[in-house]
Amino acid sequence: MQGRSSTATAASAPEGGKPAVTVVDCDVHPHFVDGMKDLEPYLSTAWRKRLGMGHAEAWAKEVYASEVSIPKNVLYTNPVGVMRRDTVPEDGSVPCGDPAFVVRDHLEANGIDRAVLVGGSVLGLGGLPDADLATALASAHNEWMSETWLAADPRYRGSLVVAPQDPQQGAAEIDRVGERPGFVQIHLPLVNVLMGDRWYFPIYEAAERHGLPVAIHPNSIDGIFAKAPWLAGGVYTYYTEWHAALSQVFHGNTISLVCQGVFERFPGLKVVICEGGFAWLPDVMWRLDKDWRSLRDELPWLKRPPSEYIVEHLRVTTQPFVEVERRSHLTALLEIIRADQTLLYSSDYPHWDFDHPTRALSGVPQETRSRILADNARELYAERLL
Amino acid sequence: MQGRSSTATAASAPEGGKPAVTVVDCDVHPHFVDGMKDLEPYLSTAWRKRLGMGHAEAWAKEVYASEVSIPKNVLYTNPVGVMRRDTVPEDGSVPCGDPAFVVRDHLEANGIDRAVLVGGSVLGLGGLPDADLATALASAHNEWMSETWLAADPRYRGSLVVAPQDPQQGAAEIDRVGERPGFVQIHLPLVNVLMGDRWYFPIYEAAERHGLPVAIHPNSIDGIFAKAPWLAGGVYTYYTEWHAALSQVFHGNTISLVCQGVFERFPGLKVVICEGGFAWLPDVMWRLDKDWRSLRDELPWLKRPPSEYIVEHLRVTTQPFVEVERRSHLTALLEIIRADQTLLYSSDYPHWDFDHPTRALSGVPQETRSRILADNARELYAERLL
């Protein structure tokens, strides 16, 4: 499948060179088609046994401690369904399970020149209590993504996943596959250790070593973190509450990354926040800059106002995009967060609250829009994207 | 101490009427001077014994389980000190412990016509595991505030505190003192139950019955809530991180109050968020409105976009005020959150990050500024403020 899009918004090939990249979707979610069995070819016999693979009886899924699965959100249901209904293939299989279908249904239909994949079936990997098992699944998933997705179309780019439960093994996995063509970033599922904690330093060192950004994403397990079963304030009741509260995770991890001096220690590190929105950023930037002016004795390793580290090192994807009452409010928001540097377009295909590249961003000034749709991603992922 | 301020910003008396109220400070923190002993006159012998009062030995403070105290933040220290040094009286006593001193040092010096007191020594009341003890302390604190502060100057107004551990007894306390002159709102210290939970309904019913707003505030105990020892994402290391992350508590409780339909059930209820800032509000308003358009099946009791409930029922105090790069960003923020209705000036006297009524708000358009400095508070507290 080498065909390129021919829609109006798609890239045109400059003479004698590679086709231009004008729209980059930084958050697309490939799913397993047959659950964990998709990983079977990439797992040792011992791990297959530990996972309970081979219990063919249907009842095995209904009892405890028979098969391992990666934890999913089971506390909330989305009343309109988490997947766009029109992303379900005609044979009724899993949305975003077939690379060729997604090329037609999303890349070509919407003029997407590059799609950065974030594994939709491993978002909850951090919820597994066994660090070795999680590490083995991460490696298997990276092989699966290479063979099933990256090899299927030249427009796909991959996020190599690491198990956050064991950062040393995570770093080794980055060394193992980080230079393979097709991978453009590291996907770090979160646990209840804030991102500034030195716990993650081996991963950040490896990220710098290979020039790969680190991406985080909501992880679908309840309350976001396996070991911290609530967001700020308590346990939410409804999907709407939980979904609106997700901002807090990114609010908190941004504070942690900046204040702990991670970006002074790892000056080459870039962090990508997927599917967290971005309207929470002004609060973080303003609060941190204001506090830093008074309290910097506490954080002597910070040499510049916190917002400068954010603009330099943090990238946020657009989805879910804000819907504002007045155009001037969007303009102010984009200026405050320096969207011309920090913001990356993402559709979140095949999820229910999909954002189309031109329709969702129609209120964005033209110059900023092209930065968001492609330029910021090109600068971030550089030659790996091309 | 009946003297009124004569500074330029203070109220002038209209002919034949009460003096005008042009600056209302909605968050000032009276403290105990001698710790819990200040409450001794208002407690029964049995409670004094349970509290360990009378253990005069100095070592009693150094051992476990000898004296009860209300939990305080002991995990973080503020590198510049939590209290403004210039609020310490010459005799070295507690800042904001002497009502007459505060009249001179704050009300008259800064042209404050009314100061709404939020007990600075009971912020962590929700951290006590014994609901009956917390209830007894709340009642004692209300008597102490009446006699020590409200009787001392006609410009003081009080927040009657209730123990969140037992909402039925909290409602009874509201009935007991809610109509006393001087009290203008209910101070609800939080525990790890989100504010939309029916747990609090007896308190909301009593609040409506007496026409009293319910105010919440950071509570100084670690991670904010006794039973939920972290904010979103994990445990923060530094004061700066913890302080910047406080927004999350108010982000989360606003989501909870709106989504659970509290404002449909209690249409007369007003909630005041003290010292939480307000730059987190656009994210909540936009996310909830956007989700509500798609997901309203889940919350059929919501008859209007969530942001409309927020504008009608929620009030936020200004401190800590935002410091922006461009005037237009502040204008956009104030428009988005409908500051002409929702925002109340507060100084947070005697805390370190004090905001002066005119200097902190100098970038606010004149018309909105007078709404923030007094009109919104006058509409909220009505005749109780005058």
Image: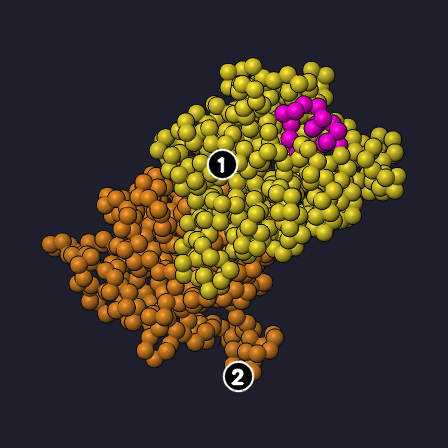
Chain colours: A orange, B yellow
Query: From the image, which quarter does the N terminus of chain B lie in?
Result: top right
Circles 1 and 2, Cβ within 8 Å, touching? The answer is: no
Q: Position of residue B48 (x, y in %)?
A: 85, 38
* Circle 2: residue type: Ala
Q: Tell me if residue B151 is in the magenta stretch.
A: yes
Q: Give the range drawn in magenta.
A: B144-158
Residue B10: image location, x then y, percent: 53, 19
- Which residue is found at the position 54% from the left and 18% from the top? B15
Q: Can you tell which of label 1 and label 2 is closer to the viewer? A: 1
Residue A291 lies in the magenta-colored region: no
Subunit of mark 1? B
Q: Residue at x 65, y 55 (%)?
A: B199
Q: Mark 1 points at which residue?
A: B343
Report crowding for label 2: few under 14, some 14 to 19, many 20 or more residues within 10 A (C-alpha): few
Disc 1 marks a residue whose amino acid type is Leu
Q: Are marks 1 and 2 on the same chain?
A: no
- Which residue corresponds to the image point at 87% horizontal and 34% vertical from the top-left? B55
- Mark 2, chain letter? A
Q: In this view, does A323 lie above or below B39?
A: below
Residue farthest toward the left in the current orientation of the protein:
A15
> Mark on residue A58?
2
Label for residue A171? none
Query: B195 left or right of A345?
Result: right
| Structural distance between the alpha carbons of marks 1 and 2 | 58 Å
Image: A240 above or below B40: below
Can residue B374 be spotted in the picture? yes
Depth check: B250 or B177 in front? B177
What residue appears at the point 49 percent right and 45 percent down from the top-left corner? B312
